[in-house]
Every structure is written in C-alpha cells, then in structure tokens.
Image (spheres, grey):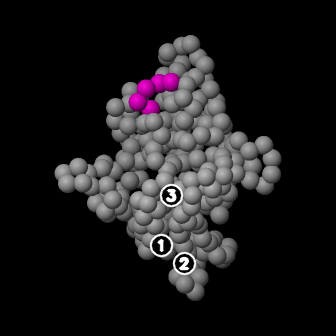
Amino acid sequence: KAPYLSNVEFRRALSLGMDRPTIISTFYAIGPFVSEIAQSSFLENSPYYDEEWTKQYTQFDPETANKMLDEMGMTQYDENGWRMTADGKAFDLVILVPNYDVQWGEVAEMVASEWRENLKLNINASIMEPSLWGERTEANDFDITNLTGSNGFLYVSSGSIGDWTGCTGYNWGTRFMPGVHIKDGDKAFEPTEDMQKLMDLGTLAQTTTSDEERDEAIKGIIQLHKDNLWA
C-alpha cells in the first residue's frame, strides 16, 4: 500500500475520482446555502490564500484518474473487478473514520463508493469511536482517514504554522505524517525530502524575526502542499 499512498500521482487520481458536487448536494447544501468545492487549503480570508491550491485536482475527471492509475501499472484486475498492484497482488484500502458525527461516516462511505465505482479501487470505510481512531492514527496504523479542515490559516501564529507543517509534533492538521514523529518500531518512517522541508520551513516561520523571511517560508509551505497533495 505504501508505494501507492506515498505516490502523489495516486493521490491526485483519488482526488480526480471524487464527485464533489454530488457529495456537496447530498450533505452540504441547505436551501440556498451550498458549500464550495476546495482542497484542504488556506481559506479565502487568509492573508496567504492561494486560489490555484484551493482548486487544483478538484474537478471530477475519472477518465484522467483512470489513465493515471494505468500509468502506475495498475492494469490488472482480480476476480471481483478490483485493480491490483503493478506486480499482480491484491490491493485494498480502508478509510478510518472517527464517528464524531454520523455524517462523517456517511460522507466517507460515499467517497469510498465513488472510488470503487469510478476507479475500480477496493476502498471501504471503517467507522469507530474517536478515542480508538486517535490511537490508531497516532500509531500510524491506518491507510486513509477523513477529518475536518485545520484553522484555515486565517492568521499567522505559532499554532497555525504548526498545524500545517508538523514542525512542533503530530497534530490535527498533519494526520498525513504520524510516522515521522514515532521514534521506533515498524510504523515509524523517515520523513521524505519534502516533509522534512515542510517541517524546516515551519520552524523557520515560527522562529524568524524577519517578516520577509517568514513570508517566504510560508509561501514555501504552500508550494510544498500544492506539489504533494498530502491531504
């Protein structure tokens, strides 16, 4: 699983295989009020809002997504019609869902069903108590998880920087990198080059006394998120 989950092209394919308009119309529309489509990115009121980041890979384009999976070598299918790994092994993923609200599970199940239908990937949702979810995610014992957005970076603070970079440890906004903060064991892993850059830029943005240097560090953080689509 790791070679695929760690591949940004796989993550981009998942993003393109998600029918966000249907999800929004089903769960996030009340009368005239409808949620906007966006990646997990800084909110529009943030001083560092980036429209390209917000909109990239949010269109529903299963044709392109399937081509991307084909190019990764996932062209074989098992007896149930699910894509297999490039070397012909069974492939499945589980979305770990904390049941803070019943809708969290319903949304995750819809996303999983879209990935199964649109991409022929065997992905299912597993709903559990938040305490168990916390233990599992902090131990890096999961494939995918869903979560609400972080603080949207509406203001620059040590906390907001830490949320988006993991430079102060594992937290709400960096569920994609728990293994980096585990010291030993089979669930620990060395940060990728870009994850290390993310943490280093976070530390720089928190500690520098130069407004210009902080500004450049935050822009670098944004670019790393855009390049990697971690969440």
Query: According to the image, label 3 marks what residue?
Result: 99
Which residues, given as a range, are shown in magenta? 153-157
Residue 151: give x, y in percent of width and height: 45, 36
Q: Which residue is mark 2?
A: 82
- The one nearer the camera, 193 or 67, is 193
Read off the residue under disc 1: 116
Q: CA distance from mark 3 to mark 1?
A: 22 Å
Residue found at the far top of this picture: 209
Residue 77, above or below 134: below
Dot 3 or dot 2: first in sequence order is 2
Q: Are marks 1 and 2 in contact (CB under 8 Å)?
A: yes
Q: Is residue 49 left or right of residue 72?
A: left
Of the image marks 3 and 1, the number of the one nearer the N terminus: 3
> Which residue: 61% across, 36% down?
166
Seen from the viewer's position, the closer of residues 202 and 68 is 202
What residue do we see at 54% from left, 18% from top? 213
Residue 219 in the image: state x and y as whole percent: 48, 30
Within the magenta stretch, is there residue 154? yes
**Distance (Cα) linking label 3 and label 2:** 28 Å
Q: Nearer the viewer, mark 3 or mark 2?
A: 3
CA neighbours of label 3 inside 10 A, class few (<14), some (14 to 19), many (20+):
some
